[in-house]
Image (cartoon, grey):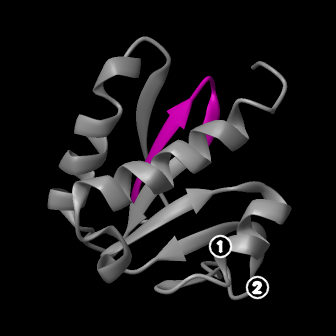
Amino acid sequence: MAYDEALEKRIRKVLAARRDDVREQKMFGGIAFMAGGHMCVGVIGEDLMARLGEDGADAALDEPHTRPMDFTGRPMRNMVYVAPAGTRDDAALAAWIDRALAFVATLPPR
């Protein structure tokens, strides 16, 4: 499955200041960005995937352009997909990435 390489580059630009603890990994037929050893955000098809935790994901689903991440056919309660309209400008993309970084910062170190 192909994924949006332009979105990948935009994410990489937002995360550039954190290069020491961010790595990229191909997965789910797309690409994931790991922060502090935890999956944080990624690109599946043309959508942003954001790991927000259960509470954060529940809140995000009340916002436009989001839906549950259901890659396996069952919704993953701590992740959401954000459609391209929700990441159209750099500020919106950075806000989603910041939310995901804030969540993974609460997880135990790896």
In the image, which disc is placed on residue 20? none
Q: Nearer the viewer, mark 2 or mark 1?
A: 1
Q: Three-letter amino acid code at disc 1?
A: Ala
Task: Look at the picture and state if 72 lies above or below 8.
Answer: below
Pick the front one: 97 or 45: 97
The dominant secondary structure in magenta is strand
For the C terminus, which image quadrant? top right
* Residue extending furthest toward the top: 20
Q: Is residue 45 left or right of residue 79?
A: left
Residue 7, horizontal then vertical, whole percent:
24, 59
Q: Is residue 89 left or right of residue 85?
A: left
Residue in the image at 30% along x and 38% along y: 14
**Mark 2 / mark 1, whichever is N-terminal:** 1
Residue 49, horizontal then vertical, whole percent:
50, 64
Residue 93, horizontal then vertical, whole percent:
35, 57
Residue 50, horizontal then vertical, whole percent:
56, 59
- Is residue 32 rendered magenta in the image? yes
- Label 1: which secondary element: helix
Residue in the image at 15% along x and 59% along y: 6
Image-quadrant location for residue 17: top left
Q: Residues within 10 Å of mark 1 (few under 14, many from 20)?
A: many
Residue carrying label 2? 74
Q: Residues in magenta?
A: 30-39
In the image, which disc is placed on residue 60? 1
For the N terminus, which image quadrant? bottom left
Residue in the image at 22% along x and 49% along y: 10
- Label 2: which secondary element: loop
Q: Three-letter amino acid code at disc 2?
A: Arg
